[in-house]
Image: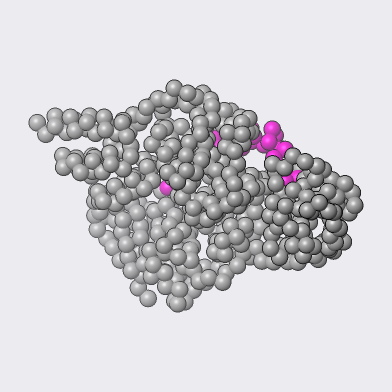
Amino acid sequence: MRRIIYVIVVLVMFAVMQADLGEQAIIQIFDDELLSAEDIYQQFMMFDDYQDVSEKGIVKLDSLADGSPWCYYVPDSYNVDKPNGLIIWLHGGVGREDYFDPEEYWVDHSILEFAKEADLLVLMPMSRGDCMWWESAGEKHVFDELLIMKERFNIDDDRVYMTGFSDGGSGSYHFGYRLPNEFAAFYPLNGMISVPAHVTGKTCFIRNLQNRYLRVVNTDQDGLYPAVSTRLTMDLALDAGADISYREYWGYGHDWGYFDEDLPLMAKDMQKRARDSFQSHIYWECISSEEYNRCDWLEITALDTLAEKQDWQQEYNVQLPDDRISFGFYHDSEFKGDGIMVNKVIESSLAAEMGLTDNDIIIAMDEVTITNIDEMEELKTEKQRGDEVSLTVYREGETSLLKGEFPEIVYYDAFFYDQSSGAVKGKYHGNIFEVQTSRVKTVAIYLNPEMVNLKIPVKVIINGKEVFNEIVGYDQEIMKENIIKNKDRKALWVNKLEFDVEK
């Protein structure tokens, strides 16, 4: 009789989930007293009853509750009956006060051709001035939109990839060494690994990149992040144990002109990459137990930064040359006249020192007439640090000649370590977990029945001392919190063990 009731409950549960995989439907399932925690786990793992979509092969525009726009693409190959891969594309040019026009930006974008060839859905967040990829608002937008995609479509949680160009490439690094849990691999294009740290002022740890694979591409003539500089950071990352492959294209500047050559290589690489949330070894380091403090099954829940730092918690750094030829202003891309309309002058830049102001129209560089930003970029290729330069500007009906000098080359640290951090190293085999800590007060281990055999005891050893050896069951509250927060059917954690670290 109980079996019949159970089958009926499961059928009802699927009917609810088919209509909605949102928070209220999930809570309703967990509140059903006829289902055990193990029953619920199995049903979420097997769930694939998504609604089919009528429109495919086009870009769809959507918006979040705060009005922020975003787009997604569903390829013709999308099959509602099987899990499908998803790629998140982070655009460049973040920090602008206005949005890109979403529909105009994504029309015929190269990433759509890529998605069609690779049979992937695409999520395309849209950034704005207060919503950069490495800021909390930008992170939230990405994850909120990812959750909506997982509610609407049959997404393979183990095949979610992230890529992007310029600031989008730098943003991909940010998610790689700070928020990797939802992703299988990262593909930064013409970005810089240290940008998120310098912009946010928060220390980043490239050693964290050993937990996910990155395929990095840069170009030799990139005026922002040339290969000669990115090579130095790639060597550093490899020394730190990062899982990175690095590729260069020569003859290209800060543009994706190598797309046709690189697309099939990237697609082929993605076919080999699947997330392993249950990896046997983890290294993780952070400066706060409130954010960026977890990788897969290992979490730092409290720091003890006054404790002695272990020898294996090392700092990795390299000196980078700042030899970019840059004035330091944003131009108005909507300006239709001849010349370059200045949208915003960056403080403490050469442009500011020269006296350039917002709304100036630049009509000449070194007395050579220029009609658009591309002509200025071409003239800048002939300049070196220390060279004199002049700009002729049209301002309030008059022309003015502004003079200045590009600063000499200076060197700076790629990373900074002025904030105390804690680190953990964890590994497991069978049901035995071994964790080493440095400047950590409490640590947590998350469990999944694919990792360990829950029918026999789980043993935990911290800093060489056994602290736990018991059978562990399913915890419904932890499961519910997990599925509501992440909509992740593959890495569905069923219990959490937390331990104080003895001094």
Residue 130, placed above or below residue 439: above
* Residue 272 lies in the magenta stretch: yes
- Percent position (x, y) of residue 107? 61, 31
Task: Name the residue nearer the viewer: 400 or 239.
Answer: 400
Res 259 quadrant in image: top right
Quarter of the picture containing the C terminus is bottom left
Question: Seen in the image, is 264 located left or right of residue 484?
Answer: right
* Residue 487 lies in the magenta stretch: no
Residue 232, placed above or below residue 340: below
Tell me what residue is drawn at x 71 percent, y 38 percent. Answer: 258
Q: Residue furthest left?
A: 1
- Percent position (x, y) of residue 381? 83, 50
- Percent position (x, y) of residue 40? 25, 40
Tell me what residue is drawn at x 48 percent, y 36 percent. Answer: 62
Identify the magenta region. Answer: 253-277
Tell me what residue is drawn at x 56 percent, y 61 percent. Answer: 200
Tell me what residue is drawn at x 72 percent, y 42 percent. Answer: 335
